[in-house]
Amino acid sequence: MSLIFPADALAPGDSSIPLLRVEDLHVAYRSGGSDVAAVRGVDVTVDAGRIVALVGESGSGKSTTAHAVNGMLPAAGRVSGGRILYRGLDLTTISAKDFRGLRGRSIGLVPQDPGTSLNPVARIGAQVAEPLIIHGLANRRDVDRQVHELLERVGIDRPDVRARQFPHQLSGGLKQRVLIAIALAARPRLIIADEPTSALDVTVQRTVLDHVDELVRELGVAILLITHDLAVAAERADTVVVLKDGEVVESGTPEQVLEHPAHDYTRRLVADAPSLSGARRLARSAAPEPLLEVSGLRRTFRVGGDTIKAVDDVSFALGRGRTLGLLGESGSGKSTTARIVVGLEQADAGSVLVDGRDVTAMGRKDMRELRRSVQIIYQNPVSSLDPRYTVGRAIEEPLRAFGIGDAAWRRLRVAELLDQVALPAAFAARHPHELSGGQGQRVAIARAIAVNPALLVCDEPVSALDVTVQAQILDLLTRLQDELGLSYLFISHDLAVIRQICDHVGVMRQGRLLELGTVDEIFDDPQDAYTQALLRAIPAPRQAPVATGRS
């Protein structure tokens, strides 16, 4: 039998049954000769023209539930109980071949990471065309027109040009829109969006989510949204389902669940989310003498025949024991500025003084010594750790590199550092692949503070973490700053995180520093129109029911 429903994407279907109904779903993974339950009795209903958000920590079962719906469980996973009904058809009873017929044509997927989800050696147009050709929805003569229409529908400018480009030639926001176009290509009625905006800047995030809303309104597409961003769920979803340890603990409208949570776990999630809790660091006394002074910094790159001003006359100062946040969209120059500060990038002009010493004028020997004063924490903790090294060896490595202490002393120092980042001493024997995201970030922080630096450059250190783990890492950074007198240059696209942890904020755009001031000055009384636009783009819970026009 054919499992492709006639005119599946746009037909209204039988309104008496939900588009998707997950009933008492159980999913188990085979591990060490026994089954480990990952999802236990989950119930979710998604009607046409609605957005249902699954939220919860890593390991809560939200992604496993989505993978079961789309027939994409790994080899070790299996549905051990319950039903997954798509328009009344139980997907747990169909073959892998039949599922391939549904996938893309009836159920689309927008994966999380646009950087790794697109084929780097295939042009954008060919990747968008693939589902059209596979499902027999376009011939070779007509496919280019359909591809251009799809790219235009998701808000991509110059679709004829973009179709000829490769993924590396597009920004993160454009790549994410390409993934949405691919998901829409075969006109499915249900789209599973797995963290579709977690890596995007706030303005790009809003643009992408606005396009998703348009699809829901205009085409009646249903969205199963997997997200750890509670503010996105509060602003965009019709229903929020909270999962913990593979079970649904709470479900309802965003107002019911996130503004008036009934379960302790949901209340903790909301409290840990800076975008919802409104928590922020208390204002502190005037900044002490500066540790870091950046003056007239400039850096240009040649791209093809064009000259790009990555950093254009940037100046700021960071006091000892204080945190300065740099925010802005991708390409604003904030990360290039940070790389110059730590000596990983050369400046064309200007100076960077760390404790009075100019980084831009240092030779190799002085630059090596700078590493003891300035360390960096990267966005992805596990990829920043050598997979061959144990945790203990990774933390010990900077001590060995600088010849600090003997082997016995270094073992004691590693144990002390693990204790400082709230990890048991036994973790020293683990390898990076055995760590969760939060544990990996704690190890990265322990390694960064091993040589007692004065300045830590934090490059998106919590953007890949769930809200609870994110809150733990931010609390850890705050505690270490208070205990060790550390200064932080904090790079982030998450304005709520910046507001929570920083003392001062600099707003960058196209290489220039547009505004610089205290957190209160920037967030409560922004002067630049671009800063005002950034703040307007922050997701916010709905204040009252709104007419969405959804069917």
Image (cartoon, helix red, strand yellow):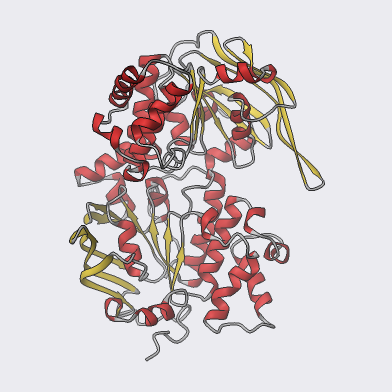
Which corner quadrant holds the C terminus? bottom left
Point 56% across, 22% down: residue: 517
Identity of the residue furthest to the right in this view? 305
Q: Nearer the viewer, residue 292 or 273?
A: 292
16 sits to left or right of 495: left
Would residue 112 be seen by someone viewing this image from the given angle? Answer: yes
- Numbered-mark total: 0
Rendering coords of residue 48 (x, y %): 39, 71
Measured from the top left, where is residue 233 in percent x and y? 38, 51
Residue displayed at 32% across by 27% down: 421
Relative to residue 485, is residue 184 depicted above or below? Answer: below
Looking at the image, residue 153 sits to the left or right of residue 215; the answer is: right
Q: Residue at x 50, y 18 (%)?
A: 372
| Residue at far bottom of view | 1
Q: Nearer the viewer, residue 535 or 187?
A: 187
Up-down: is 98 above or below 247?
below
Q: Nearer the viewer, residue 381 or 540?
A: 381
Place of residue 12 in the rendered image (x, y in percent of width and height, measured from the top left): 42, 80
Residue 365 rendering spot, x and y as whole percentages:
62, 17
> Is 461 above or below relative to 136?
above
Left/right placement of residue 371 relative to residue 307 reads: left
Q: Nearer the viewer, residue 528 or 297?
A: 297
Q: Quadrant of the N terminus?
A: bottom left
- Judge whether residue 38 can be spotted in this image: no
